[in-house]
Image: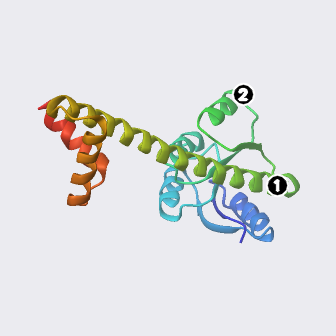
Amino acid sequence: MKGRILIVDDDPIVRLDIRHLLEIANYEVVAEASDGFEAIEYCQKYRPDLVMMDIQLPLLDGLTATKKIMDDRLALSVILLSGFSDDSYIQKAKSYGAGAYLVKPLQSRSLIPMIEVCIEKGRKDLSLSQEMEKLSKKIGDRIIIEKAKGLLMARNHLTEPEAFKQIRTISMQKRVPMAEIAKLLVLHDEL
């Protein structure tokens, strides 16, 4: 299978047509939903690669559901479907993080390449986001360690290498990451 897809449309015939196109192209349809709340629920349950979602849905519209899905990283990408090329919808789709906006009726010749591009872009975006989180954590850890070193240097009249060695020694003895030791040292000093 090329990817896992959730189809969201309140018209069962449209869902059936989309499912047929996807299955022919070797995609797995993990579920079908008929409103935005179901879309979010199925994304939480199945974590699809892609959501194909109509904008006009009962209970919760596709744009609002897209924002929730993308903000919570419940899918790699969302392709919004609409019978209208309304500029306000397009602007919201862009600001809410949709991967694409397609006007119905769908044509498999253009739909399948769009799906492949959206899934791949979603994978790259996820990878970059995870890498940024790791780097941010490393920077945050480094900052707190530097702050703790400064406190130890001032309080105990230590050199920078001595203060670092003290934090590292406590970390090794207690089997706790240096950043956690540093946070506790800083917290202790702030009390």
Amino acid type, residue under disc 2 in the picture: Asp
| Numbered badge on residue 65 | none
- Describe the element under mark 1 as helix, strand or loop: helix
| Numbered badge on residue 113 | 1
Residue position for label 2: 87
Residue for point 22% across, 32% down: 153
Answer left or right for 145 relative to 43: left
Q: For mark 2, does the 10 Å Cα neighbourhood hold few (<14), some (14 to 19), or many (20 or more) residues? A: few
Can residue 82 be seen here? The reply is: no
Q: Is residue 4 above or below residue 54?
A: below
- Describe the element under mark 2 as helix, strand or loop: helix
> Which quarter of the picture shows residue 75?
bottom right
Q: State the image coordinates of residue 88 (x, y, percent, origin top left).
A: 67, 27
- Asked which colour scheme the image uses, the reply is rainbow
Which quarter of the figure is the C terminus placed in?
A: top left
Q: Which residue in the rendered view is the most extreme toward the left?
A: 191
Residue 2 vs residue 15, the one in the foreground: 2
For marks 1 and 2, give the one nearer the viewer: 1
Can residue 148 be seen here? The reply is: yes
> Which quarter of the picture shows residue 161?
top left
Q: State the image coordinates of residue 130 (x, y, percent, origin top left).
A: 53, 50
Which quarter of the figure is the N terminus placed in?
A: bottom right
Marks 1/2: CA–CA distance:
24 Å
Amino acid type, residue under disc 1 in the picture: Pro
Residue for point 55% across, 52% down: 35
Mark sitting earlier along the chain (1/2): 2
Residue for point 72% across, 57% down: 14
Residue 109 vs residue 10, the one in the foreground: 109
Q: State the image coordinates of residue 108 (x, y, percent, origin top left).
A: 84, 57
Answer left or right for 25 relative to 120: right
Residue for point 69% across, 49% down: 121
